[in-house]
Image (tube, helix red, strand yellow):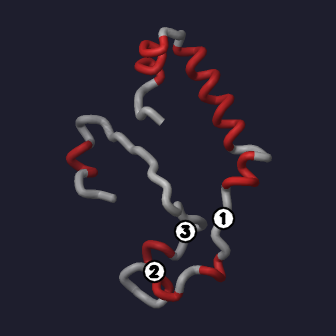
Amino acid sequence: VTGLTIWHVGEWFQHLNAMISRYFHKMLIIFSTPPFYTKYVHLLDENKIHTRIQDNMRFWPFFKDVIGALDGSHIHAAPSAADRGTFRNCK
């Protein structure tokens, strides 16, 4: 969530990196297994892809293999300082 490394999070909360890593993996397992995953993650049905996307060759090559979509969600992504120029103006 913070976009920081384990070292930075450990430094901020004054805990060992091993403890931060252990709890990160525990949360990853919780979010990727039932009941959380089955309740909150919904895969898109192939037959329900909007015709506006399927019929438009501008969009379809990029979306034809997509198995799901984010609706109203924002995922923070923070590339390193060296890579920021590459990703500037990318959505």
**Kind of residue sitting beneath label 1:** Leu
- Do the CB atoms of the residues marked 2 and 1 lie less than 8 Å apart? no
At x 41% / y 29%, what residue is drawn? 4
Q: Which residue is mark 2?
A: 60
| Disc with the residue nearer the chain's start (2 vs 1) | 1
Q: Which residue is mark 1?
A: 43
How packed mark 2 is, by other alpha carbons closer than 10 Å (few <14, some 14-19, many 20 or more), is: some
In-front residue for pair 35/66:
35
x, y percentage for residue 65? 54, 71
Q: Which residue is mark 3?
A: 66
x, y percentage for residue 20? 56, 19
Mark 3 or 1: in front is: 1
- Give the distance between the C-alpha atoms of the residues marked 3 and 1, in whole angstroms: 10 Å
At x 25% / y 43%, what residue is drawn? 84
| Disc with the residue nearer the chain's start (3 vs 1) | 1
x, y percentage for residue 69? 54, 64
Q: Is residue 51 above or below residue 20?
A: below
**Kind of residue sitting beneath label 2:** Trp
In-front residue for pair 56/37:
37
- Give the distance between the C-alpha atoms of the residues marked 2 and 1, in whole angstroms: 18 Å
